[in-house]
Image: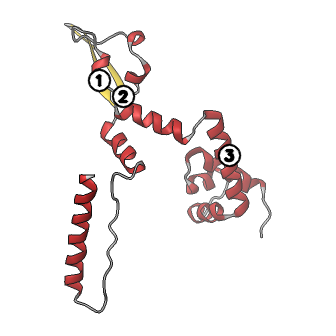
């Protein structure tokens, strides 16, 4: 086993920046073949341990727990844009908007026109957040398992499996 060199340690630090092995290898001083070296270094036990330790320290410092991440995704998924406007339909001042409503905002565009200031709120990807939550809670099937009897006709086996998958989906939806 190779010793843990300062350049390997630098690679682990650089990898923690953007999780890109090739770029981390280049920044750590591995010139030629950085893509291959980056992939190889990611598998090295000491480098893996160093990257894991750095990630753990970052998670602790940022208080990134699975619960916090899910809560933030839920805030995006269920944010109501109506809470960004007053009863007259005019945009509220930023100081009057609560954090839960702002969690659903990707950007705020303020444009000066000859008729006055126009404020537009661009929403976060609510559908994407809902898909992440649905996957987390097992509400979406990302794959279908097919059991094929090699002794029979392949076309018939595929059709049987397709029909079984449809029936399973109907049952899951009904629940």
* Depth order, front residue of 83/7: 83
Q: Label 3: which residue?
A: 54
Sequence order check: which comes first, mark 1 or mark 2? 1
Q: Is 148 in front, or is 91?
A: 148
- Residue found at x 22% / y 65%: 167
Relative height, residue 1 to residue 70 (above, below): below
Label 1 with label 2: CB-CB less than 8 Å: yes
Q: Residues within 10 Å of mark 2 (few under 14, many from 20)?
A: many
Q: Using residue 75 as the reference point, say whether residue 50 is left or right of it.
A: right
Q: Secondary structure at mark 3?
A: helix
Q: What whole-number distance in Å separates the C-alpha atoms at marks 3 and 2?
A: 30 Å
Residue in the image at 27% along x and 10% along y: 86
The residue drawn where x is 40% and y is 48% is 137
Give the structural element (helix, strand or loop) at label 1. helix
> Helix, strand or loop at disc 2?
loop
- In what quadrant of the picture does the N terminus appear? bottom right
Instruction: Pick whichever, 153 or 97, lies toward us.
Output: 153
Above or below — where is 33 with respect to 83?
below
């Amino acid at each position: 086993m190779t010793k843990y060199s300062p350049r390997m340690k630098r690679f682990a630090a650089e990898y923690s920046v953007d999780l890109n092995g090739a770029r981390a290898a280049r920044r750590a001083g591995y010139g030629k073949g950085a893509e291959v070296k980056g992939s190889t270094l990611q598998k090295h036990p000491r480098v893996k341990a160093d990257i894991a330790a750095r990630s753990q320290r970052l998670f602790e410092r940022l208080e990134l727990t699975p619960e916090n991440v899910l809560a933030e995704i839920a805030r995006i998924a269920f944010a109501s844009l109506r809470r960004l406007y007053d009863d007259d339909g005019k945009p509220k001042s930023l100081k009057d908007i609560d954090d839960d409503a702002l969690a659903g905002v990707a950007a705020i565009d303020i444009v000066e026109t000859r008729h006055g200031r126009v404020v537009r709120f661009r929403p976060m990807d609510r559908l994407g957040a809902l898909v992440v939550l649905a996957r987390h809670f097992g509400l979406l099937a990302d794959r279908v398992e097919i059991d094929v009897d090699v002794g029979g006709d392949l076309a018939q086996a595929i059709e049987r499996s397709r029909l079984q998958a449809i029936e399973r989906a109907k049952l899951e939806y009904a629940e």
